[in-house]
Structures are given as structure tokens and as C-alpha cells.
Amino acid sequence: MLSLPSSVTVAPGGGGLPRVRVEGPAATAELYLHGAHVTSWRPRGEDDVLWMSGASAYVPGTPLRGGIPICFPWFGASATDPSAPAHGFARRSAWELLGADEDGDDVTVRLGLGDSPATRDGVWPHRFAATCTVTVGHRLTVTLEVTNLDAAEVSFEEAFHTYLAVGDIGAVRVAGLDGATYLDRLAGAAPRTQHGAIRFTDETDRIYVGTRATVTVEDAVRQRAVSVAKQGSATTVVWNPWVERSAAIPDLGDDDWTGMVCVETANVGADAVRLAPGATHLMSATLGVGPLA
Ligand code: TA6
């Protein structure tokens, strides 16, 4: 039986799925064991920094829409089996609650996922141990640690597919990727170069390679800036579905594209992780929020 600090409670959430609530001194948060999925982070005095779809399913085996889905061990379609579920199995799996602690203004929750007959039976027949650590405070830090329990090297992709809430996507600038090379998933294979900040005028689905710097989402409507700092991540993905794609995705409302942007801390494609037997890789993202300068 786990002993949890008084700031951490577990109760049924959407669809009856187990939801961990954190009521910390500096912030509140919610996360589901399903997917180790953070669905809310609200620093005291702030609106939620994360965006959740009102149409999200809360069903075992189906990813939640919004918050911070964990994509692992592949990103997008599987390279070896296009019929395998998009973005891997981690966001569709029930993780185990390993424990929680308080330390000053921070509350940390730890979850774990290992291989199982179901994961080994698919396109990724490897043995692994993953832990997801979520620290809720003035900042939100999510860390994914993956250990290769196989006797051979293994390769995987990973992403925190973070949905950030914004006042109006038309008044958003994403700064920090100036000069970076990106692959535009909507415009063919030729690499492109980012000039200045990103502004949104249409569907945007870009993979910025070799990018380790902090990215900032400047929100002119909410007059706030959300920073995404990272460790152990060389890829940044930026996505907004815009009008038609929102309408085509069943668990997105038709107008949802106006109020969200995904800035994803990742290792995908050429930045995929290669892990020796017994080795552990760590990727973390730290979100912060403050007034727009
Ligand atoms: O990260 C961007 C992306 O890979 C897009 O291509 C887009 O389709 C999105 O993720 C959502 O994927 P999902 O499987 O959650 O519908």
C-alpha cells in the first residue's frame, strides 16, 4: 500500500480512470495513470497552462486529447508497421503509481511502465523499464527515463506532445527556434530554415531538428509567456491543426485550434535515442509561465 503525502490524492476521473490530484503550495495539477498523462497544471493565480479537449475520450487503450501525451517508443506512424497505433503505446497504457513526495513548494509524483506480453507482441519486442516523474511547483517538470533491459542496443523515439493553452493562436509567437532546420510534414521532404519567431496562419506541423534551446510561447491575448526548457532532447515539434484538421479529428472541437498550440520536447527521426544494453536515457521538459515582456 502506497503512502502518499496529503497534497496528493487518487480518485476516479474522466471515464472512471484513476486520476492523481496534486494540491501543492505553488500549484495544482492533475494526471492520469492512463498514459502517465498530465492534464492540468495551474500555478497559483494563473489560468491552466495546459489545454485539454472537452471532447477527449477517457477510455482504456485510447489516448487522451490535450495535456501532455507521452509518445513512446515511436513518434507518428511506426516505421516498420503503419498499422501500429500512432505515437506508440505509452500514451495508451495504464502506468503504475510508484510514489509521491513533497519538498518545499514542489510535489513530485512518480509513475512506471514496463514491457508486457502486449507491448512485446507488437512492432517493438524489447524489454524496458520507463519511469515518468512529474514535479508540480512554480514550474512543471516532466521527466521520462527509459532503461534498456535487453541484451542488444535498442532505438526509440519519444515526445512530450504538450498542448499549451493560448488566448488566440493568431496572436501567438513561438520564439527560440530562429535559424533552426525543420522538416515541414505538410510540404515535402526538403529541409527548411526557420527565420525569426513562428507565427500561425494555417495548419503547422514541423519537426525542428538539433534543437536543445528553450522555446517560449508569447501569448499577446493572455499577456503571458510560457517557456519550455528541456534536457536530453534534440528535437522540437510544433503543431497546430487549424480549421480542416480540427474538424477531421473526432476528439477535437471544430474551433479548438484557436486556443491551443503544441510545443513538443522530443527525440525523433535522426535524433532518435540509441541505448546500449543496461543504459538509461533521460528526457525532461520544464514549463514556466510569466508576464509577456
Ligand atoms: O505532433 C504533431 C502530430 O504528429 C501531427 O502530425 C498530428 O497529427 C498530431 O501529432 C496528433 O496526433 P494524434 O495521433 O494524437 O491524433
Image (spheres, rainbow, N blue to C red):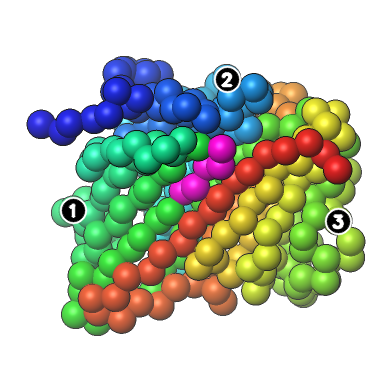
Q: Magenta span covers which residues?
A: 138-142
Q: Position of residue 261 (x, y in %)?
A: 70, 41
| Residue 213 picture location, percent across and down | 68, 65
Left or right: residue 152 versus residue 272 is left
Mark 3 vs 2, N-terminal side: 2
Residue 2, magenta (yes or no): no
Q: Quadrant of residue 134?
A: top left
What residue sits right under mark 3 in the picture? 197
Marks 1/2: CA–CA distance? 32 Å
Q: Nearer the viewer, mark 3 or mark 2?
A: 3
Would residue 54 be found to the left or right of residue 94 on screen? Answer: right
Please tell me which residue is depicted at 42% across the width and 38% down the height of the picture: 104
The chief SS type of the magenta part is strand
For the question of whether residue 208 can be seen, the reply is: yes
* Among numbered discs 1 and 2, the one appearing first in the sequence: 2
**Which of the two labelled residues, at mark 1 and mark 3, occupies the earlier sequence position?**
1
Q: Quadrant of the C terminus?
A: top right
Residue 243 visible to an observer of this rendering = no
Give the labeled residue for mark 1: 116
Question: Could you tell me the amino acid type at mark 1?
Answer: Ser
